[in-house]
Amino acid sequence: MTNPIYELAIIGRITWDLHSLNNEGSIGNVTEPRTVMLADGTKSDGVSGEMLKHAHVQALWQIGRGELPLCSNCQKLEPSKANESDAVKQTKDTDSAMAAAVTGCALCDLHGFLVEKPTINRSSCLEFGWAVGVPDNWHRDLHLHARHAVGERGKPGKPEKPAKDDKAAKTKAAEAETGEQAAATEEAAGTSQMVYNRPTRSGIYAVVTVFSPWRIGLEHLHYTYLIDEAQRLKRYQAAMRAYQAMFWRTDGAMTTTRLPHVEGFAGNVVISRTNLPVPVVSSLDEHYPQQITSLVETIGDGLETIAFANMAEFVKVMTDLSQGSVPYTLAKEG
Ligand SMILES: [Zn+2]
């Protein structure tokens, strides 16, 4: 085996300007951005691991179409419903259901699934932490917009207002009524249109994600590989490509009108080439590159790290690792 990869971690800082990739939901006509709390009590802006996993799934699905086997549900991009997969439904026991799900679908294999009947599950080969706004390096604005009904412009009427008992929404709406936003409110008051508030955020975000190529094609009922090395390599390379795509154009909420301006991406890829979990150091700490280098040297034992200073370098690192390495195969016996 040449250059096996057991696990790899991508640890870095990405700058997204003017995005709204992830939100708590809406209160009245105000959409609330995600807020997270750090260990020292600091509040920060965040994009959830679920959203980043979704971004990887979206990219992998596009890359995998016509290239990789996809189950009937994943072809329609409904991977959470593996139990409705045609191939899985025809099975009678857990072994054959697992085999059908893993061999028949690269997306189910890589991102995991839950089957209710027979009851089996597979955890994801990829893990994503929250993308967290680096303290003092993120900002939020609430912008007020007016949606004009066709033919209604200029007609008298009332704009939609937050519910009376919704204090938070009213506060946010009040915050928004400054400068040009106040002018928009004034204009909206004379028409029968809907007024709504949307958050816009900019910041440097710390990201951490781990990929475990050793688990590709491996079922955990008997710990045997269900697909051959050539298939494992194809799935590994597709997952690496999807990583590139999810960072060079991140999919998420509100990208129709708040497509993120990607200003920069820098960090480290940490690689474990032997059966040792890859270490993950948070990129919230500004000295994380030195910490990673020092940790990798201290642990030794098949670990290495490659730094990248921008998106193009990140893409090159991932392409080199994709073309020059193969997924690690777990030994059958010690
Ligand atoms: Zn699937």
Image: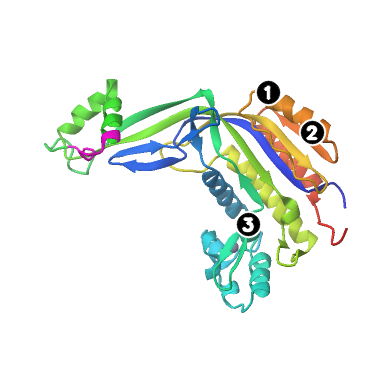
Three-letter amino acid code at the position of disc 1: His
Task: Kindly state the secondary structure of the residue where label 3 is placed.
Answer: loop
The amino acid pointed to by label 3 is Ser
The picture quadrant for ligand 1 comes to bottom right
Mark 2 crowd level (few <14, some 14–19, many ≥20, 10 Å Cα): many
Mark 2 highlights which residue? Answer: 296
198, 331: nearer the viewer: 331
Q: Magenta stretch containing residue 144, yes or no?
A: no
Mark-to-mark CA distance, 2 and 1: 14 Å
Indicate whether 290 appears above or below 320.
above
> Residue at image x 72%, y 61%?
217
Which residue has dot 3 on it?
123
Q: In the rendered image, which residue does mark 1 sit on? A: 287
Indicate the position of residue 49 as horizontal and vertical percent values: 55, 44
Q: Is residue 159 left or right of residue 331?
A: left
Q: Nearer the viewer, residue 43 or 314?
A: 43
Residue 326 tag number = none
Query: How far across and down, in percent of the image, does residue 260 sit?
Result: 49, 34
Q: Quadrant of the C terminus?
A: bottom right
Mark 2 CB within 8 Å of ligand 1: no
Badge 3: how crowded within 10 Å, few (<14), some, or many (20+)? Answer: some
Mark sitting earlier along the chain (2/3): 3
Image spot of residue 132 (x, y percent): 54, 33
